[in-house]
Amino acid sequence: MEGYRFGGIKISEDGMIIDGNHRYIAYMIAGIEFEIIRGTSSHCDEPRSFNEIIIDEVEDWDHNSESSRRYCTDDFLQDNDFYN
């Protein structure tokens, strides 16, 4: 919503997301249009419906995880140790 773009979503001919599941969810939540890149799936790709996904905004995994909490905002980009 702040103008970040993370690249397109790779989708097979039958409409299955092959690469970009998390990007797809982020774009949909933010209401941002995204590029669709055509690709092919393999027998390893297991189809699942995004209609079954529940997003828990209260019990956010990253926010409640000691190791990833710092990445919930962009403040970590100001830390000198991030780049070293």
Image (cartoon, rainbow, N blue to C red):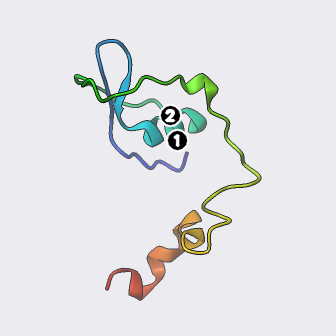
Q: Where, by quadrant of the figure, is residue 37 drawn?
A: top left
**Above or below for 7 versus 12:** below
Q: Is residue 75 left or right of residue 5?
A: right
Q: Which residue is drawn at 63% across and 58% down?
A: 61
- Quadrant including the C terminus: bottom left
Q: Position of residue 22 (x, y in %)?
A: 46, 42
Q: What element carries label 2?
A: loop
14 and 7: which is toward the camera = 14
Q: Which amino acid does label 1 sit on?
A: Ala
Q: Are marks 1 and 2 in contact (CB under 8 Å)?
A: yes
28 and 16: which is toward the camera = 16
Q: Residue 1, labelled with which disc?
A: none
Q: Residue at x 71, y 45 (%)?
A: 56
- Quadrant including the N terminus: top right
Q: Where, by quadrant of the figure, is residue 16 drawn?
A: top left
Q: Mark 2 points at which residue?
A: 32
Q: Where is residue 27 in the image (x, y as percent from the top left)?
A: 50, 37
Q: Position of residue 49 (x, y in %)?
A: 53, 22
